[in-house]
Image (cartoon, rainbow, N blue to C red):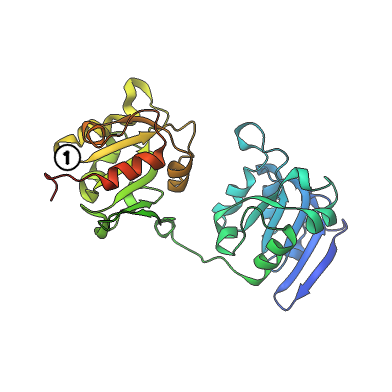
Amino acid sequence: MVADSQPQIEVLTTARGRVMTMDSAYHVASANSGRDVVVAASYCGVLPARFMARHHPRAVIGVDCGIGPEGASIAGLWYLEALNIPGAAADVNTVILGDGEDVYRNGVVSRVNRPASDCGVRPGMAVSLAAVNMLRSDPPSLDPSEVTNRQVVYQSKSGRQVVCTDSIAFALPEDRHRNVLVTAGHTGRSAVPYLESAQPFGFICSDGGMGRDRSGVAGLTLVEPLALAGATVDARLARMGSGVSSYEDGVISACNCWAEEAGVKVGMLASDAARLLVEFERLDWP
C-alpha cells in the first residue's frame, strides 16, 4: 500500500526539512524519509504507524480519534517511540478528519510520545507549533537504561524528596535512606532485589493488576524486615511504565506495615500517600 503519487501539501520549508500535510497516513512517501514532519488526518494506531515508519519521516502528527478501547487509536505513538520517531496526536474534536491541512492549522495536541516530548511538544499545544518544534529539534538517541523519566515532584522541609521514575531499577545512590520513589513496575518478588539494593526512604510501585495469589504485591511484605515503607497503586488506574502516572493518577491498592504506620491507607491518592511517606519521621531509620 505505497502511495508516493498521492498528494502532499507543503506548509513550511527550512534548511532542515519540511512540514507536509496529507489527508491520509498512507500518503507518507519515500520523499519524506529523514527530513519531513508529516501531518496526516488519520488515526495514530499501529497500522498507520507501520506504513509511516517504513519511510522513517522526521516526525509524525496524526489524530487521536477518541483514543478508543485499549488506546488503539493512539497506540502507534509507542510503536513510533520504539523507533525513536517523534509522534503526536491531535484531539479529534479540534480537527476535520480526512483534511490534513485542517489538522495542521486548527488541531490541538492531545497525546505525545517520549521523542516528541524531547522535542518540546506538549499536550494542549497547537499542532502547527508542535510541527515547528519537531522540525527544529532532534530527539536524543538514548540507550533504554537512560530513559528513566526521573522527576522530583515534592520536597519536604527535611530535604527528602518524592521522586518519580519509571522503574525501581532506576534508583540512584542519592535515593538511599533519603527519598520516596514513585515508580511503575509491579511489586512481585522480582522487584525485591532492586528494592533491597536501592533502600529508599519509602516507595510506591504498581500492583501490576495483582495477579494470582496477589503476587503483584508480594514484595511489600518481603521487604518489611528491611523496614522499607512501601505501597502499590492500582494498575487499572495508573499507567504501568510511567512513574509520573503512578503519582498523578494512582490510587493505593495495598501497603505494608511500615507504610500503614506512616498513615497510608488503601483507597488513598498516591500523591497524598507519597507525601505522608516522605514527611514521616522515623526514629528507627538510619
**In x, y percent, where is residue 125?**
67, 57
**In x, y percent, where is residue 62?**
72, 50
Total numbered circles: 1
| Farthest residue, direction bottom | 15
- Amino acid, disc 1: Ala
Residue 123 located left or right of residue 223: right
Quadrant position of residue 178: bottom left
| Farthest residue, direction top | 213
Q: Residue at x 71, y 38 (%)?
A: 66
**In x, y percent, where is residue 19?**
76, 66
Kindly identify which residue carries mark 1.
227
Residue 200 located left or right of residue 150: left
- Residue 126 in the image: above or below residue 16: above
Residue 78 located left or right of residue 256: right
Q: Nearer the viewer, residue 104 or 154?
A: 154
Mark 1: give few (<14), some (14-19) or many (20+) Cα within 10 Å.
some
Q: Nearer the viewer, residue 152 or 190?
A: 152
